[in-house]
Image (spheres, grey):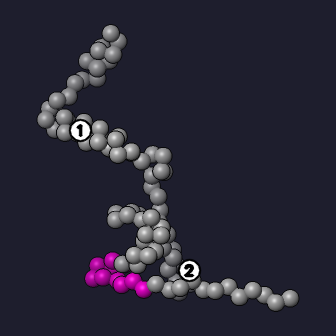
Amino acid sequence: MASKAVAAPRERIGRIGQRREVVIPREIFEKLKMREGDIVAFSRIGDSVLIKPRRLVEAEDELTPEEAKLVRRGEAQLKRGESKSWRDVKHALAR
């Protein structure tokens, strides 16, 4: 019985910068749907390093564009001092 040969994945090359920053090749970055600022986990496996994207927020917990717009609007109102106490809000809702 002949065993199947498993092809090794094509290697991609990245660069380590001055502050130990690692550049992830664009093809891999896009394939994994990563974004700037994402968190990655590093594991040492023998003489190799495994880098895995880590999702801190589940997809259903992310804000939709409309929700993000509402949050930004609310933050702007707070900065302008346009806020109400919770007591006033509860009283208005009870009507």
User: What number is the disc on residue 45?
Assistant: 2
Q: Which residue is mark 1?
A: 73
Residue contact between numbered discs 1 and 2, judged by CB atoms under 8 Å: no
In front: label 1 or label 2:
1
User: What number is the disc on residue 89?
Assistant: none
Q: Residue at x 33, y 79 (%)?
A: 20
Q: Residue at x 36, y 84 (%)?
A: 15
- Could you tell me which secondary element the residue under label 1 belongs to? helix
Near-viewer residue (8 or 52): 8
| Quadrant housing the C terminus | top left
Q: Quadrant of residue 69?
A: top left
17 drawn magenta: yes
Near-viewer residue (28 or 81): 28
Q: Residues within 10 Å of mark 1 (few under 14, many from 20)?
A: few
The single residue placed furthest to the top in the displayed view is 95
Magenta-colored segment: predominant secondary structure: loop
- Residue 34 percent across, percent down from the top left: 42, 65
Residue 76 seen: yes
**Magenta-drawn segment:** 13-22
Q: Quadrant of residue 13?
A: bottom left
The answer to whether residue 37 is above or below residue 8 is above
